[in-house]
Amino acid sequence: MTATGNTPPFDFSAYCGDIADLATQGLAVATGEEGIRSLMGRVTGRAEEVLSSRMSLKDRGLIACGPGCAACCTINVTVLLPEAIAIARYVTGAGNGLSHLKQRIADTASRVRWMDDGERISAGIPCAFLDERGWCVIHPVRPLTCRALSSTDSQQCRRALASHGSCEEEMIVVNIFQKFLMEETFRALSMALERAGLDISSRELCRSVTRCIQDPHLSDDFLAGNRIRFPD
């Protein structure tokens, strides 16, 4: 990936510490799935506020990503458990109309389990959270890894993905500040989990969300400091 955008210097170390503190405070009072979803809302909300404040009109005009463009939604996505719990809560929440996704999420988890990015891209297995228009139905609670990605040219992005792993692999031009910001947010959340003595393992998105949907007590076990087991 190469960068685009020209933003003034930013103290990523201080930002990471602030997010870690915010997450630590939230974890201390969180109870159940809704508590974790609220925590994730504060963490991602802060990240999006910082991103918005640093994006110039020129930067925004360069971003080609938007509703219906799902070119990159065939790569594996890694999440921390609080992210998966928040997404599971969003999917199963009353009034969301997303309960029909449960089986699709589980089926996708099974299909991609042993695949690396190149194999999944070649197989063309899309994200389970896309609707028939190619829109992300969990956009408000989407993973930090997804928030980190952007492209300035959707066609070039498709070509880059198609060339993944080849000797003529192309690069995706991204907003580097956005990428680093969301990656630091992910790292800060992991730091907060480690401080609290909680499970810091990162796992594939669909497998993690399926596990959270199937076990209504998982969030309580997680907050109690128990290691969350994933059946083989």
Image: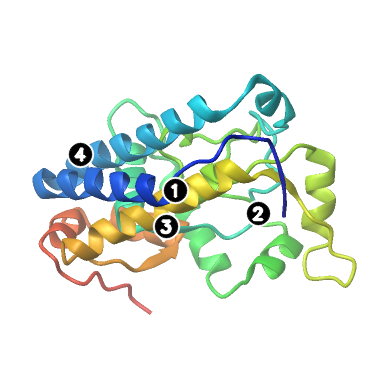
Q: Earlier in the sequence, mark 4 or mark 1?
A: 1
Q: Secondary structure at mark 3?
A: strand
Q: Nearer the viewer, mark 3 or mark 4?
A: 3
Mark 4 belongs to which amino acid? Glu
Q: Secondary structure at mark 2?
A: loop
Spatial CA span between label 2 and label 4: 29 Å
Spatial CA span between label 3 and label 1: 21 Å
Give x and y (percent) for residue 145.
Answer: 51, 51
Q: Secondary structure at mark 4?
A: helix
Mark 1 belongs to which amino acid? Phe
Give x and y (percent) for residue 171.
Answer: 79, 55
Q: Secondary structure at mark 1?
A: helix
Q: Earlier in the sequence, mark 1 or mark 2?
A: 1
Identify the disc placed on residue 34: 4
Q: Nearer the viewer, mark 4 or mark 1?
A: 1
Give x and y (percent) for residue 201.
Answer: 34, 69
- The residue where tag 1 is placed is 12
